[in-house]
Amino acid sequence: MGSLQDVRGCLVDLDGTLVRGQQALPGASAFLEALEGRFVIVSNDAEHTPLELSRGLKRLGLAVNQRRIVLAGTTALDEIALRLPRARISMMASKSLMTYARDQGLVPVQTRPDIVFLGRDRQFSYERLMIAANAVRDGAELVAANPDLVHPGPNGAIVPETGALLAALIACTGPVPHRVIGKPEPALFEAGLGLLKLPKRAVMMVGDNPATDGEGARRFGLRYFEIRDGVFPLLGSAPSRHGSTGALALTA
Amino acid sequence: MGSLQDVRGCLVDLDGTLVRGQQALPGASAFLEALEGRFVIVSNDAEHTPLELSRGLKRLGLAVNQRRIVLAGTTALDEIALRLPRARISMMASKSLMTYARDQGLVPVQTRPDIVFLGRDRQFSYERLMIAANAVRDGAELVAANPDLVHPGPNGAIVPETGALLAALIACTGPVPHRVIGKPEPALFEAGLGLLKLPKRAVMMVGDNPATDGEGARRFGLRYFEIRDGVFPLLGSAPSRHGSTGALALTA
């Protein structure tokens, strides 16, 4: 695990790693280019679709195909649709995710859902909390897109994340079994690895958050590189290939 | 503590003790009448004023003067107004409590509050959660009217209470010092005892909830009678006064 020479692809976190706020971080674009397509972005985003995010990244100067983006919200919905096709689903989520759920054959409902789905719902309210709590109490399965409590906003402002809404819900229902999809749980790592089509030992997780990226990679069995002070990993930069320029290169 | 003969007044819980849903419980009216005014209702209600509740109880056939009602929401605001007169206060609360706060000289604001106040806010939202979390992060003091997670609704439905909203807020801010006013904390017991003008040893707490009424009474040093199966305590029912009829009577 000491050498990065045998790394052939990366799973890469988004917020804090490639972008911050509305800006790409220095070196992010060069890092992705050097990976020559052998990367998948894995993010706890519980609000957008890969297509939306791909468009957003393009505006920031990062060209990333939507098929290289794995997000907690849509991955959770994929998982539900696969396991319970046409499930009745009560969604506390963005309009994008509601549309995405319908596209996967799920049936958003207000009453008697099979599943209560919790994403980063900016329309979260006392009323929605009550509806969700009673649905779970009445037997609906609970799925939360990610466990994050907050998201760093502009100037360090607190932006509530899915986990904070989950805290209110669990406070109402008491302890109930539930699934959480986002990092550090394995689902995003699995989905990302599936897209890379590489063996685990050849893949590295690159992120900035020890609790989600680092802990998740450790549990899933991926080596982990933590971005600090904006320094990206140098992959396969053996002198025989690129001299000592520090340029990124992947072993084929 | 075994005898009830020396009980000269009661603090009485409301929900589950005197009323349930929109009905007075059998025996509640007779119990209050037998107390001949020597009672104070102490409730974790974090939404109404004593005047509103007095009117509501009248409709249920319970005549209780507003001066005999101590509620968590208004008691919390009383305490803030006494400690920090004219404090700037960001309120997640009912309109009634907002009006009450103004009447106490407090100044409801949207930005840069001294205090963030959390009651049972049916307008609670993602937006309000974010505003409150950032205000607390920026140094505002946090006061929650009660610690209750839920309130029993019609047909056993879950009705979110102040404590569930607090759970979301604390999830966002991380652990922060904060004050909680409702039972089992001592504030309502103190306020109730002050209105009764009786020594602690002559006062009994009557309630239905071991975690709030019982635990609060124990910590505050009041004896406690728990209502079970709708049976109210018989106070001072010595044969010399009322025979064995079971009628309630207080020692003077």
Image (cartoon, coloured by chain):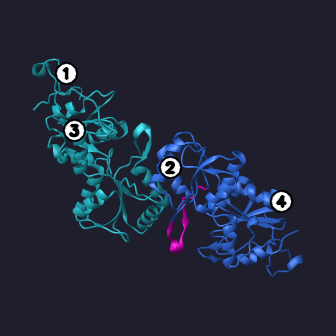
Chain colours: A blue, B cyan
**Please, is residue A63 above or below residue A197 in the view?**
below
Cα gap from disc 2 to disc 1, whole angstroms: 45 Å
- Look at 15% across and 41% down and name the residue there: B198
Cα gap from disc 4 to disc 3, whole angstroms: 72 Å
Q: SS at mark 4?
A: loop
Task: Please determine if labels 3 and 1 lie on a single subunit.
Answer: yes
Task: Please determine if labels 2 and 3 lie on a single subunit.
Answer: no
Q: Nearer the viewer, mark 2 or mark 4?
A: 2
Counting every numbered tag in the picture gives 4
- Labelled pair 4, 1 in contact (Cβ < 8 Å): no
Q: SS at mark 2?
A: helix
Q: Is residue A149 magenta?
A: yes
- Residue under label 2, please give it: A169
Q: Which residues are magenta?
A: A146-158
Looking at marks 3 and 1 on the same chain, the residue that comes earlier in the sequence is marked by 3
- Residue under label 1, please give it: B246
Q: Nearer the viewer, mark 2 or mark 3?
A: 3
